[in-house]
Image (tube, rainbow, N blue to C red):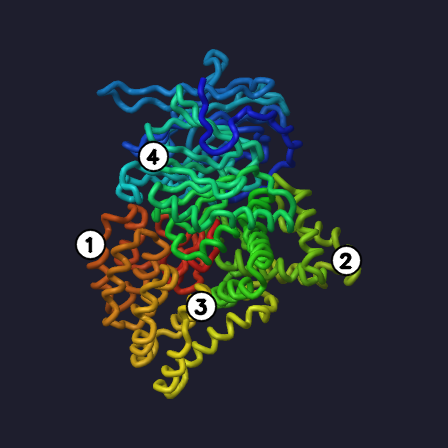
Amino acid sequence: MAAQCCCRKAPGAEAAPARPPPAPPPALDVASASSAQLFRLRHLQLGLELRPATRELAGCLVLELCALQPAPRALVLDAHPALRLHSAAFRRAPTRPGALAFAFAAPGPAAPAPPPPACPGAEPACRPLAFRVDPFTDYGSSLTVTLPSELPAHQPFQVILRYTSTDAPAIWWLDPELTYGRTQPFVFTQGHSVCNRSFFPCFDTPAVKSTYSAVVKAPSGVQVLMSATQSCYVEEEGVFHFHMEHPVPAYLVALVAGDLRPADIGPRSRVWAEPCLLPTATSKLSGVVERWLSAAEELYGPYLWGRYDIVFLPPSFPIVAMENPCLTFVISSILESDEFLAIDVIHEVAHSWFGNAVTNATWEEMWLSEGLATYAQRRITTETYGAAFTCLETAFRLDALHRQMRLLGEDSPVSKLQVKLEPGVNPSHLMNLFTYEKGYCFVYYLSQLCGDPQRFDDFLRAYVEKYKFSSVVAQDLLDSFLSFFPELKEQSVDCRAGLEFERWLNATGPPLAEPDLSQGSSLTRPVEALFQLWTAEPLDQAAASASAIDISKWKTFQTALFLDRLLDGSPLPREVVTSLSECYSSLLDSMNAEIRVRWLQIVVRNDYHPDLHKVRRFLESQMSRMYTVPLYEDLSTGALKPFALEVFYETQGRLHPNLRRTIQQILSQGLSPGTDSDTGTDRDMGAPALLLADEAPGGGLSLRDVNVSA
């Protein structure tokens, strides 16, 4: 049987590592309907068939479980109305998990769609189980499977579910026209935060981790990739095999399939992209990813996941990047900007330690992943690009944080690091700039308490070693911190109050302290000086002085920060906008989309009609929500709304249906700030045009400010 390697070592090529010891029962997660506290999930197996013609995924799921108490009455899993369950069955688990042997049926020429793949193993050993599906929230359902009454504790058993998924929030089907090559269909999944319950029934909570395996059948010519440590393609069977040897939460099980080609960019990294994008992606990242990984290993210990590959997705990908283990998903639109590309990928690299290896156990403490990953990202950039660049990028993000603070008000409950998640609320609504930047400031504060960034790096290395492949709460981090630095315990009888941990975690408003960014003054001072010139009197003199400053030599983050300041001050006096256009408009036309979209927002917010044709041209060429939504938000709020409608009706056929619905809602009635009409997710509300991890339109905000990693 010939097996062709498609991205990583083949399953079974090496002895499987010993399974980790049983984890304690997970904390109660109000975003999960599951009975995860009653079971230990040992492994999950997926048999999947991709059916792009009907936008349907057919699946067989095998959950290998142990009951923590004898005779549990039922197993409750998170599911979704998009999942149609066909059958449930029970069987005793084998002593050693066997290889997957899913059977895929093919329809005849005029036959209906085939059933989901048959599950592995001898059918007579399976016992049918009763099940029911009940409403849970607007982002999911509960699936209750009745278990045999005699089930003992701590003995492995399997529950086998056959299902199909159609129109699932986690599964994004793209027609060939929405890809760059326009020849093959494309599909990807996006599980963060609670979408993967529409991909497969699961314990959809970050508190539960397990290893997983998958067998995937796809149409001929379609390459399938998953977030797995091992993979291969078995040509005779026409199926892809995957295995993830380390425990991961459900939201990090990810799949992408399409016309994708690989190119090596380092000893343990390759990029995957559509053929026309591959040369650009390779040239941008060749050699540098290994440099980033090596810097991270010097700081935080060995990279645990084997390979670090990157796949570039079409512009319909709803976020900037996602830290799926072994296979980071990145939107191809970001290839235009070298600096944004570097920062976004380094952030995802940092998640390999903070977020993937050590995960927040509850969505109420997402800062444990995002704040630590942002801190680690900036330590990596300091090591590789110097302190000045890191301070510039930090100033840019903190500028966005304060913008969000002004919009929300200092008493907004979402500005807390530990936000109370109420039942029924989608946890993605808690994802905002505070998760990243206030979380980063708190971690920076901890590093200053110990007085030595290198010693703090040593602590974080020990923290990862202690908690790798598990899920933690804030108390775990803080207890480990005080144990590593016992001298800090002695500074106060009430160390929590004396060290202000409680205020950092539970106070609303901006960070209690921010880092010293003076090392970046050589890059930030010119930005502030130029902004002051454009807001000074008299304008003629100021414009003459400003025109002498050559911003074409600036870094992208400098120009973006300057334009964000102008956006904050919009609407500007008419003569200022006219002079700005005369001075910069042609120059900005040649810059990347991160810069152009900011200038075009200035054009829109100031009703500057001479440059309006550039807004039209930009929207005609963009299919990404990170660049279209901010402009449509601004266009829909004033006299330019008819122009927005005209452009939208001309271009809507080139947009993904989800993005089309979002823009239609913006144009028809507008959205409340921070709510995504498609994914129900919060936006970073950062720079006037920034797309966050699970962005959403509204309020003149955007996600590009955030290191979107869901």
The answer to whether residue 289 is above or below residue 700 is above
The image's mark for residue 203 is none
User: According to the image, label 1 marks what residue?
Assistant: 650
Q: Quadrant of residue 619?
A: bottom left
Q: Quadrant of residue 704?
A: bottom left
Badge 1 crowding class, 10 Å Cα cut-off, few under 14, some 14 to 19, many 20 or more, is few
Spatial CA distance of label 4 from label 2 is: 54 Å
Amino acid type at image mark 1: Glu
Q: Secondary structure at mark 3?
A: loop
Determine the residue located farthest toward the top in the rendered image.
124
Amino acid type at image mark 2: Lys
Which quarter of the rendering shows the N terminus? top left
Q: Secondary structure at mark 1?
A: helix
User: Which badge, 2 or 1, is on the more N-terminal residue?
Assistant: 2
User: According to the image, label 2 marks what residue?
Assistant: 489
The answer to whether residue 158 is above or below residue 225 is above
**Front disc: 3 or 4:** 3
Amino acid type at image mark 3: Trp
Spatial CA distance of label 3 from label 1 is: 36 Å
User: According to the image, label 3 marks what residue?
Assistant: 554
Q: Quadrant of residue 536?
A: bottom left
Label pair 3/1, CB-CB below 8 angstroms: no
Label pair 4/2, CB-CB below 8 angstroms: no
Amino acid type at image mark 4: Thr
**Front disc: 2 or 1:** 1
Q: Position of residue 430 (x, y in %)?
A: 49, 53
User: According to the image, label 4 marks what residue?
Assistant: 166
Q: Image point 39% across, 39% down: which residue?
A: 188
Q: Position of residue 434 (x, y in %)?
A: 52, 59
**Front disc: 3 or 1:** 3
